[in-house]
Amino acid sequence: MLSQEKIKALKIFAINIRMETVRAMGTLGFGHLGGALSIADTIAVLYGGAMKIDPKNPKWEDRDWLVSSKGHAGPAIYAALALKGYFPVEELLTLNKPGTHFPSHCDRNLTTGIDMTTGSLGQGASTSVGVALGHKYQKKNNYTYLILGDGETQEGQVWEAVSFAGARKLDNLIAFVDNNKQQLDGFTRNIHDTLDFKAKFESFGWHAIDVDGSDVVQIYEAIEAAKLEKGKPTVIVLDTVKGKGVSFVEGKEKNHHVEISKEQMAQGLAELQLELDKEVEA
Amino acid sequence: MSTVLIAEKHETEKMAMRDAYCATLLKLASEDDKVVVLDSDLMSSMGMVPFLNKYPEKTFNVGVQEANMIGVAAGLSATGLIPFAHTFGPFASRRCYDQIFLSVGYSKLNVRIVGSDPGITAAFNGGTHMPFEDLGILRNIPDITILEPADTVMLQDLLIQTAGMYGLFYIRLLRKNAVKIYEEGSAFEIGKGVTLREGKDVTVISTGIMVKEALDAAEKLAEEGISARVINMFTLKPIDKELIIKSAEETGAIVTAENHNIINALGSAVAEVLGENLPVPLERVGVKDLFGEVGPVSYLRERFELTAEEIVIKAKKAIERKNKR
Ligand SMILES: Cc1ncc(C[n+]2csc(CCOP(=O)(O)OP(=O)(O)O)c2C)c(N)n1
């Protein structure tokens, strides 16, 4: 059970992740804002308490791993890593600048704290299964966390990996589906309906939990429940909203990769600051 | 570094390449717990059942899903393991190019991919299974090392070497019996071609099953008073530029011989080196941009002109072009 204090800290952490993401993309003028904001609460829970990590020792052998197969969520993860002290927060503003350590998509060779390289959708599913399998083979206790986009699950490779993880009973693997109901070209139901994730994963031998993906308590408790589930990987299906927390993108039609004017950045930051003040006072 | 002992007689080996593969992996796995094996439902075809029986815990047969296998291998290597992942050559290249490129190559992870049944040796599996393009596809990946062992002696040495190295490797592997080229105890240097026979009129640069054809061609040419040098270029990438340039200087005419499309693999790599350094007449023996088809290897050799006779014709043509200059 999370204490009230801890819950508050996670909520604040999530808002700060959103703010740093908006600042980095806004300074650049564009970015994959929608999908970064929808997953921010989960990233806050992971780096804010669920994951075993040591910011001073990013390659710590006993750490938990995160593979964001939707590699374009990178900037939200970089924000969390910076706020945890992996590197100075100011460095986030070099996003996508020539020679940067912070590319649009996660890169294990460029960014301290990023465990695997992703960007071609579907591939992180397989590599995360490999990581979990490697730890199991070496009798290590690390957990591997995987983040999938809902649109991403249209890739066949995802289901190759899901099927294999189920067959191998990888209970050290915990996946999330960021079910924000939108993909690049629009609403998933209008393009290629992804149907019932819980039923789909269960049919592959997974334990599946539906949660409100903007509720840090539900996310945290689902992870705790997943750890108790032996002999099965767990998927936590996150009911999320693409662009969550910033009004000019939240739930909007075209919010995948957006141009961000200086005014929009200021407006987004102001909205989030308001949220932050409310949370701090609460 | 390399001490190469060339066999006196080039006869079909008693041990199949796949059995040498299995024996070597058994040895590697017995010495190092980090060595693990992946396959996509072709372990029996690859003669790897003894490995599975001995080391079930080191065996990850993912089933029929090649792209996932490559990703899983990448993940395993990220935790410090040393994976060898096998499937048939066409699937090990065409079907998982993006996974090999990004999950392994770009990610700078440590995976050995073994693609079996090169070119016409896919024989009765036919055109769907006959990779004339695997090397061409994979040669584009920065930093990949591409190896095509000629016989069991070379295979064993290269497998052991790659197990101790870090990076992305593609090993193009005949499953059946090769022709013996080297004696036990030979050691090879990756990235350096082996000169099997000296010669001054023309150089035949060969790989895989075409090494024996090149040696036979050199014999035939010798009977006609033509002195042909024969090289086994078992590393396609990084290609041995120095040896190619030296041979161009010393013999003035080059023929390449490969069991692959003449586009994008050995013939192209040699042409690139010659074009940029010392353009001498080059003739390419190989598949002339065709799809594969079904049949016995003996038929396919003729059908796709992968014979000693063809090398002789091309060698004479290259020499003629050289003499006209
Ligand atoms: C293999 C591949 N195909 C296409 C793309 C381009 N692309 C990037 S994100 C995206 C949509 C992803 O939608 P979803 O998984 O739902 O992500 P989210 O809505 O959470 O941003 C597409 C098509 C890609 N990166 N990789």
Image (cartoon, rainbow, N blue to C red):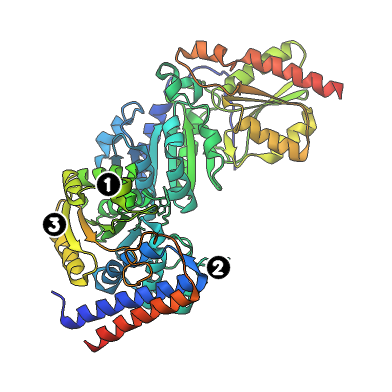
* Residue at image location 60% in from the left, 15% down from the top: B307
Q: Is residue B167 left or right of residue A79?
A: right
Q: Is residue B32 visible?
A: no
Instruction: Indicate whether B203 appears above or below A191.
Output: above
Do badges 2 and 3 share one subunit? yes
Instruction: Indicate whether B75 appears above or below A27.
Output: above
CB of mark 3 near ligand 1 (< 8 Å) = no
Name the element at disc 1: loop
Residue B94, horizontal then vertical, whole percent: 46, 34
Chain label for disc 1: A
In the image, what residue type sits under mark 2?
Lys
In the image, what residue type sits under mark 3?
Glu
Q: Which residue is mark 1?
A: A193
Chain label for disc 3: A
Q: Residues within 10 Å of mark 3 (few under 14, many from 20)?
A: some
Quadrant of the image for the N terminus of chain B?
top right
| Between discs 2 and 3, the one toward the N terminus | 2
In the image, what residue type sits under mark 1?
Asp
Q: Which residue is mark 2?
A: A97
Residue A221, horizontal then vertical, whole percent: 16, 67
Q: Residues within 10 Å of mark 1 (few under 14, many from 20)?
A: few
Residue B189, horizontal then vertical, whole percent: 58, 40
Do badges 2 and 1 share one subunit? yes
Residue A86, horizontal then vertical, whole percent: 40, 74
Q: Foreground mark, 2 or 1?
A: 1
Of residues B305 and B187, which is closer to you in this image?
B305
Q: CA distance from mark 1 to mark 3?
A: 29 Å
